[in-house]
Image: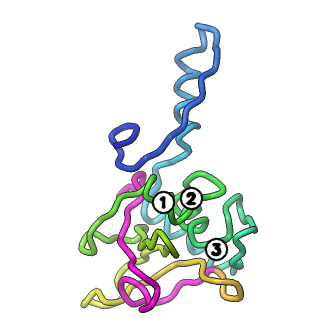
């Protein structure tokens, strides 16, 4: 467990010499800034994701939009309002934890740590075999929202549901 009892949270801290009259306030500020993870409501995650879809942000691992990498994990990091320039598919488990299919809610993600990550927007059928996905895909396609088979298109490896540690029901 990480700071504050959150699973998978990773924070780095720096030590500064601060006059005693400012130590308590400065320490709190340093702790808040060092983690660079912020609580966010599910509806805000989806709203943030829709902005990139509407703006047709292109896929470009070397590019940056609104301070985040223009790739799949940069996009999920942006939607979650996580640290910039964004986590990678390998580091998302440091700020999120695995959940079951039954627990999936809009704002969660489906992650293949070796390949790709997509935001879960909600089920599109009662059988829960398809969902609305938000993702940064590949050069030429960019950021899209589309109905996707659960857990992801065949041939793309093992995708596991994950929940951002700072997501809130509000």
| Above or below: residue 103 compared with residue 151 | above
Q: What secondary structure is marked by label 1?
A: helix
Q: Earlier in the sequence, mark 1 or mark 3?
A: 3
Please report contact status of discs 2 and 1: CB closer than 8 Å, yes or no: yes
Residue shown at 52%/75% (left/top)? Answer: 115
How many other residues sit within 10 Å of disc 2, few (<14), some (14-19) or many (≥20)? Answer: many
CA neighbours of label 1 inside 10 A, class few (<14), some (14 to 19), many (20+): many
Relative placement, left or right, of 7 versus 78 is: left
Residue shown at 53% from the left, 35% from the top: 32
Marking on residue 52: 3
Image mark for residue 92: 1
Q: What range of the chain is rendered magenta?
A: 143-170
Question: Looking at the image, do the residues carrying marks 1 and 3 touch, with CB atoms under 8 Å apart?
Answer: no
Between residues 46 and 112, which one lies in front from this camera angle? 112
Q: What percent of the width, then of the height, locates residue 33?
A: 58, 37
Is disc 3 placed on a helix, strand or loop?
Answer: helix
Look at the image and tell me in which quarter the N terminus lies: top left
**Figure check: 132 above or below 25:** below
Whole-angstrom CA distance, mark 1 to mark 3, is: 20 Å
Q: CA distance from mark 2 to mark 3?
A: 17 Å
- Percent position of residue 4, x then y: 37, 37
In this image, 128 relative to 35: left or right? left
Query: Residue 132 at x, y = what percent?
Result: 44, 83
Q: How busy is the neighbourhood of tag 3: few (under 14 within 10 Å), some, or many (20 plus)?
A: many
Q: Which residue is mark 2?
A: 87
User: Residue 42, position in %: x, y?
Assistant: 42, 63
The furthest residue to the top: 20
Q: Quadrant of the C terminus?
A: bottom left
**Quarter of image, res 43:** bottom left
Quick one: label 2 or label 1, which is nearer the N terminus?
Answer: 2
Which one is in front in this view, the residue at disc 2 or the one at disc 3? 2
């Amino acid at each position: 467990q990480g700071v504050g009892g959150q699973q998978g949270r990773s924070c780095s801290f720096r030590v500064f010499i601060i006059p005693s009259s400012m130590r308590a306030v400065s320490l709190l500020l340093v702790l808040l800034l060092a983690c660079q993870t912020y609580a966010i409501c599910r509806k805000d995650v989806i709203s943030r994701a829709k902005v990139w879809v509407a703006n047709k942000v292109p896929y470009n691992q070397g590019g940056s939009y609104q301070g985040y990498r223009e790739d799949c994990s940069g996009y999920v990091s942006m939607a979650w309002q996580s640290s910039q320039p964004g986590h990678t598919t390998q580091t998302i488990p440091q700020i999120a934890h695995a959940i079951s299919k039954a627990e999936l809610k809009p704002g969660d993600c489906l992650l293949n740590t070796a390949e790709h990550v997509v935001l879960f927007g909600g089920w599109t059928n009662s059988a829960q075999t398809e969902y609305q996905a938000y993702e940064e895909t590949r050069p030429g396609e960019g950021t899209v929202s589309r109905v996707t088979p659960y857990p992801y298109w065949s041939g793309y490896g093992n995708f596991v549901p994950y929940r951002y540690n700072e997501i809130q029901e509000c």
